[in-house]
Amino acid sequence: MSHDGQYNAAGYQVPGGDPRRTQPGTPSGPPQSRPRVAPTPPGYQQGGSPYPQNTPNFQQNQYGQTPQNGYQYQWVPGQEQSYFPAQNQAAMEDQGGMGGLTAQMGGMGLGADGAVASRSNKKKNRHAYHNIDQAVVSSQAFNQSTGNAEQYVNQDSFQQMGTGNPYAGQQVTPAMNQFPVQAAPSFSPGLQSSGAGFANAATPMPVPSGPGVSAQGRVDPEQIPSIPRARDGAAQYYLDHIYPTMEQHLPPPGAVPFVAQDQGNSSPKHARLTLNIIPSTSSFLSQTGLPLGLVLQPLAPLQAGEQPIPVLDFGEMGPPRCSRCRAYINPFMTFRSGGNKLVCNMCTFPNDVIPEYFAPTDPSGVRVDRAQRPELTTGTVEYLVPKEYWAKEPVGLRWLFVIDVSQDAVSKGFLEAFCKGILGALYGEDEDDVDDEEINGENSLEKRRIPVGSKVGFVTFDKAMHFYNCNEKLERAQMLVMPDIEDPFVPLGSEGLFVDPYKAKPVVTSLLAQLPALFSHVKNPEPALLPTLESALSSLSVTGGKIVCSLASLPTWGPGRLFLRDKNDLHGIETEKKLFQTDHPGFKKLAGKMVESGVGIDFFIAAPAGKYMDIATIGHLSAISGGQSHFYPNYIAPRDSLQLAQEITHTLTRETGYQALMKVRCSNGLQVSSYHGNFLQHNFGADLEFGIIDSDKSVGVMFSYDGKLDAKLDAHFQCALLYTTASGERRVRCTNTVAGVSEGAMESMRFIDQDAVINIIAKEAATRMIERPLKDVRNALTEKTIDILAGYRKTGSGSHPPGQLVLPENLKEFSMYVLGLMKSRAFKAGHEPSDRRTHTMRLLKSASPLELSLFLYPRILPLHSLAPESGFPDPNTGHLVVPPTIRASFSRIEEGGAYLVDDGQVCLLWLHAHVSPNLLEDLFGEGKTSLSALDSMMSSLPVLETHLNAQVRNLLAYWASVRGSKGITIQLARQGLDGSEYEFARLLVEDRNNEAQSYVDWLVNLHRHIQMELSGQRKREDGGGGMSTMGMESAVAGITSLWTGKEG
């Protein structure tokens, strides 16, 4: 099998342009590949199909247009592999130019502004000094095929750029011209490189343009803004372009992998502002209708080629901070009086520099040691902190597995799957073959799944609690039963309960292997959850830690017993919101105690046959403590065990901190108005508290004005996360973000981060679910969408005819994301179990931009028409060739087709009733020539030596690396055979489903209300999303203006 580094070669250069838009004639190329891929099977050629086929001629590209500017389709051949007779492709191909909607939409016009002109320079001497031409992060591991990728992952070095300015041709934004002085050479102890490799890092990408084609005055769905096209174009662009955090102020789409170069402004992976140019006053902001917010993912994972987060130790004095606002030292603070004064960029207070941190400044006011100070050159840094920051002695993270052994857990196979999942997470799939001496010896860091110092413990429960002594000196684990659930205590000391899983491996593996058989004859159907968790908390109260709890039936025994609240009598009425709230005082009290003790909890909840589990009450513990609830609403062991195992492994191996506090600071003139996410905040203004926090969690922060911002200065934001690492170090992670300030709203509209806007809106809407009826929340989402688009129409597109629907260039797909949000299980109209709604609500509150983007609009990949080279490394560049995805509409589905559909939570393999027997046999194995011959419970593809099978397995492995927090397994959806086909239909979010409109109808509805707003006739209560499709065609035909796809 080839090495990962083989596929990280530079390739697919797009000739200039905005990194988030693609030209109509430019193919949406494959995103970056990182997972291992299978080699081409023996006896098969990549150049064509191994069996007879019809090969339709694709003279046009995948968007239905011929390539422009001489740029050719580099990776799709003229003849395509096919498993069924050629069909009329014209209706199926994704049309490229926005201009195709000219006159087709009637009165709807898509307008876009030209590039913003450069503003006059600010008072440069009032800005923090920053070296834009500083060391550049290496993208070799991301883009080069030569060398070992791993050698670049943990490099402490930067790579020096050349003397030339590689971004000279890019448009200058206000935040770019704030640091005009060139700094001394950057500190680069490692590899040196010229700037040639980054010469195109900020080269503009082509944008769609072209004349529209009239077609009978109706909307052509092929021409409305396309999320797949935008994603695929950006993914291709960032294959061989890095994202410099100061030069570019429009981050890549959330669902696209990219390498960021931290130039003092934190990577978008850690922090995303809704507006990267902020209006100076609240009145200007209100004109846009946009929220001013920040999406924070402080522990977000990096990818190969990116600079590791620097970890700095200032000893007992701790990191330098402003004595007034307590902001931490960052690249935007300035030094005066020869280095004796430190001027805070948040509150402008001049602080005295302590002697231990003093260094003189050069004539330009720059510290002479700046290049050797990561805290002055890097936007995201970590500080080791002294004892005054400790609440308790830091130790390695304690993991306590609390395992349900009640009747349903045993009989449904959940207990066995959970135990196997723990074994796989701790020791890998080959745990029986791992050499114990190797685990504990020199190679321990390579073999360990959890950091050195971390320990694990095990508790099982049904009507009673069972604690296990797994001390490494024992031959087998000892069980201690605690039958008293009214006043429970921990019968074991921490030395017996918590052990190093690698030193006590024989005891741990023996225990987990025997648990299913041990409780197979015990028939206790009612578990006692609350007393067990109270005992678990007692065992962790001294050190803090994390609980991982499984549950397979509603806990109806003992103190804290729950009952069936969802009896279908509250659905669709105002009091339905009560089902989403936690009203049990015992669980509320326990959640507060967990956070206070630095303890968090992750739940793995299985609901066999879709039983009610009261996720609102049980999941409240994980939501408040910063944990996560994994919910399997119709758990079937043969099908779902693999996903369960993958998610347990991810829970243990992702970066996790505990006993955490978060504080967000901002510049004078702004203030924090609200937070949205899963955490505990005792009162407004207090720090956010987390029992645990991990790399997948994000928090939304909303800001308001308490004054006027100075347009001559920038706006600054700093997030400080104080936490204890899994290895037992107390640290502060600082994330610093800068934005320009403008006098007016129009300039701000040109620097919108679409993913941040929809993330903030989704988090706020999820927060409102427990306060307002669902209908009101849906209406509010519709009103907000209209306000934003109408605000842009009023402030920035006066040159367009009044009848046009003009969408901001950077919000073209925004309306589709909002429609997807309203179709999600959290907000959709109609009947939906309260457990599903509540689980989705909490997912939205903590979802990262990546996870939310996929959740609101899934990616769909046709398998029946894969080019022979798709799913394999390109022989010239080494990149994994990832074919373009298609729109989420049944109009895109071809007869006889096979499709992978992934929304980041579930991955469906949909098979048409007339799918080719050859395809089935190639994908599933010999003899599998009909849908009925397939195993409906399969969760992964068999490993076959067929070309198609290797292609699909490689593509699934790639998707797993750019997905979020959930494991990826396939679930069959055979047309006419499987119930999961309904889930497939639900994921086609552009169609009319989920009790909501189609994408086209939704745009027409928005356009109608925007016109009413512009004419002063709009009534707020008329903006609810329930416009009927009756008369829709006449509404479209009656609009007389032009949809323009031109982008300036």
Image: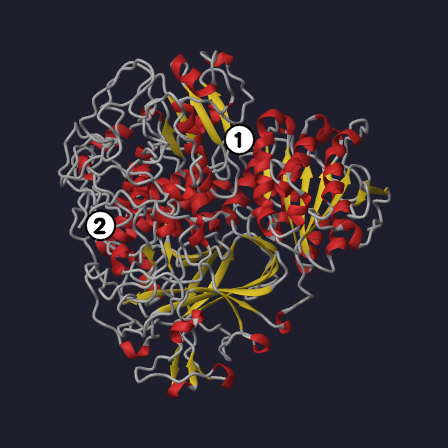
Name the residue located 21 percent from the left edge and 67 percent from the top edge.
119
Image-based side of 727 in relation to 285, left or right: right
The residue to which callout 2 is attached is 17
Q: Is residue 833 visible?
A: yes
SS category of the residue bearing label 2:
loop
Position of residue 822 measured from the top left corner of the image (x, y, whole percent): 43, 39
Name the residue located 41 percent from the left edge and 61 percent from the top edge.
266
Mark 1 touches mark 2? (CB < 8 Å)? no
**Mark sitting on residue 924:** none
Q: Residue furthest bottom?
A: 337
Nearer to the camera, 585 or 939: 939
Above or below, comparing residue 982 to residue 264 in the picture: above
Name the residue located 22 percent from the left edge and 43 percent from the top edge.
110
Amino acid type assigned to the residue bearing label 2 in the image: Gly
Crowding around mark 1 (Cα neighbors within 10 Å: few <14, some 14 to 19, many 20+) is: few
Amino acid type assigned to the residue bearing label 1 in the image: His
Q: CA distance from mark 1 to mark 2?
A: 46 Å
- Upstream in sequence: badge 1 or badge 2: 2
Position of residue 939 measured from the top left corner of the image (x, y, whole percent): 53, 27
Instruction: Say how the picture is coloured.
Output: secondary structure
Nearer to the camera, 743 or 355: 355
**Mark sitting on residue 831:** 1
